[in-house]
Amino acid sequence: MNIKSILKKIIKKKFIKYKSIIKISIQKNKNINNGHYQINNLFQISKILKLSLKKIKKKIIKQLYSKKIIEKAIFSKPCFINIYLKKKWIEQNLNKMFYINKMKIKKKKYFKKIVVIDYSSPNLAKSMHVGHLRSTVIGDSVARIMEYSGYQVIRMNHVGDFGNQFGMIIYYLKNKKKIKNIKNMSISKLEKIYCKAKKLCSKNKFFMNQSNKYTKKIQKHKKSYYKIWKYIVKINIKQNKKIYKLLNITLKNKHIFGESFYKNMLPEIKKDLIKKKIAVKKNGNIIIFLKNKKNRHGDQMGVIIKKKNGPFLYSAIDIACIKYRYEKLKANIILYYVDSRQKQHLNQIYKISKKAGYISNKLKVKHHMFGMMLSKKNRPFKTRSGNTVKLLKLITEAIKRAKKIILEKNKKINSTELNSLSKIIGIGAIKYSDLSKNRKTNYIFDWNLILSFEGNTSLYIQYTYTRIQSILKKYNKNLFHSKENFFISNKLELILSIKILEFKEIIYKSAKNGQPHLICSYIYELSSKYSKFYEKYKILKSNSKKIKITRLKISYLISKILKKGLNVLGIKVTKYI
């Protein structure tokens, strides 16, 4: 249910002739004594319609009173209308939510929209690190939220599996005569080789040229080189799969569309771009010059898609990628969850693809940028030695810390339960910590805050959920067999009831904007308000059966929302902590 949307529709019926030019701005009131909702743009409406404020407020208030939903609507100076909902209407809708549709989302027009979500996308020449956490968990939660809202979601893990990094590794191994040892090498060993090869490339022009030649050989399927490349890719995918499973990420092998997937499209795209005079040959390179874009020397900027006698570059692959997603997958929307440094590159790819006619103006391409994870010193989150923290190490540390918290609360817990619970708590905590922040901002990673039972944390939400489960277990009866309808008896129940009815509105808003933190804020506020309610009022020991059943049903609905809210974020729940 979207209460704001319902109120807007009621008001717009009075201004049916002008519905295309006016917008009704409705906000929820922070203080329930001043009404549940507030219309706050009356002055703007009166200006657009060229009617006095007095006439506008009368028309709106009269229209609101004509509906069963409204208890009263009062004009408030300087320019607001405060709206009070009918308690009976709220109770009826809680009944519907409890008995009929529960937590199901009504799939409206969204189900026809095909959304391709590009996220995680690690480099397969090295291990995943903390820099991949935000892309992976935000992208995956948005995929879940959008599916729940009714969109057709196609997950895409655009892994780096065909670039110059592999030419570097294979040439280094051959140069050092270690190529025969490849099958005995671990991921960490291969990563060290990659780092050494990368340093050599930056210092040694001959080494760089040889690496480019080897990359070209891989791209042309030269048997011996291609075989080594396949092995390196395979062991990295296996390791990443392990991480995805631990993090409860929905990415599977079928979602991997690496750079190598588009290799057969690249020669044709190159020819087509030259034919359309979008790309040109210069000094043996294939370049696309960008209009009105100059570099720091004042020369026209260009995007190189293929180097002289060398392999195709990332730009060519990304053009093929967006073309494939539009033409073959029939995408209506493409969302990129890659960091802000890729903004210019993605913008260039979009403009080139549009100019070449590979995508339509109707296609929505959005780069959902995200900030960085920082240390307490407000610097990029790294190890003491200055190296980037491996993602698997971060997950292991989270589980270890969660175990310690659990054992402090329950020393008698058996090892099986301890291992299972510590994974749910530890991994849920780092995911929730990331998702609860606005994705556009940087945030400081702090274990003490992440694994706290206070504030907007996973543990606080989990604790509220387990508390409700305990209450329902003590009641030990099937609430669905009760014939008692909802009966709201106090202000806190009313606040909680309205908050419950906002659930679907928050889901839709989060899906539309690609902002999981809206769900985190909502379930935290719901948990916080429930805690105040729990402390102030009796639930199981209430003297009135009608009030007791209402409070139990409110508790039940909140527990369902908390569970569903965490689930669409990709976080598992536990019945006890």
Image (cartoon, rainbow, N blue to C red):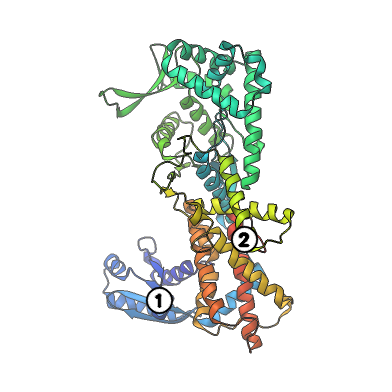
Location of residue 547 in the rendering, given as x and y in whole percent from the top left corner? 61, 85
- Seen in the picture, residue 455 relative to 571 is either above or below; the reply is below
Location of residue 138 in the rendering, given as x and y in whole percent from the top left corner? 52, 47
Q: Secondary structure at mark 1?
A: loop
User: In the rendered view, does 123 fall on the left or right side of 79?
Assistant: right
Q: Please tell me whether mark 1 or mark 2 is closer to you in this view.
A: 2
Q: Where residue 408 is drawn, which disc sits there?
A: 2
Q: How many marks?
A: 2
Q: Is residue 99 visible?
A: no
Q: Quadrant of the N terminus?
A: bottom right
Location of residue 152 in the rendering, given as x and y in whole percent from the top left corner? 60, 48
- Seen in the picture, residue 92 relative to 47 is either above or below; the reply is below
Query: Residue flagged by tag 2: what amino acid is it?
Result: Glu
Q: Secondary structure at mark 2?
A: helix
Q: Residues within 10 Å of mark 1 (few under 14, many from 20)?
A: few
Front-lying residue, 250 or 2 = 250
Which of pointers 1 and 2 lies earlier in the amino acid sequence?
A: 1
Front-lying residue, 304 or 128 = 128
Residue position marked by numbered label 1 in the rendering: 31
Front-lying residue, 383 or 371 = 383
**Residue 459's image quarter?**
bottom right
Location of residue 60 in the rendering, given as x and y in whole percent from the top left corner? 37, 76
Q: Is residue 549 visible?
A: yes
User: In the rendered view, does 119 fall on the left or right side of 234?
Assistant: left
Q: Residues within 10 Å of mark 2 (few under 14, many from 20)?
A: few
Q: Quadrant of the C terminus?
A: bottom right
**Residue 533's image quarter?**
bottom right
Q: Residue at x 47, y 15 (%)?
A: 208
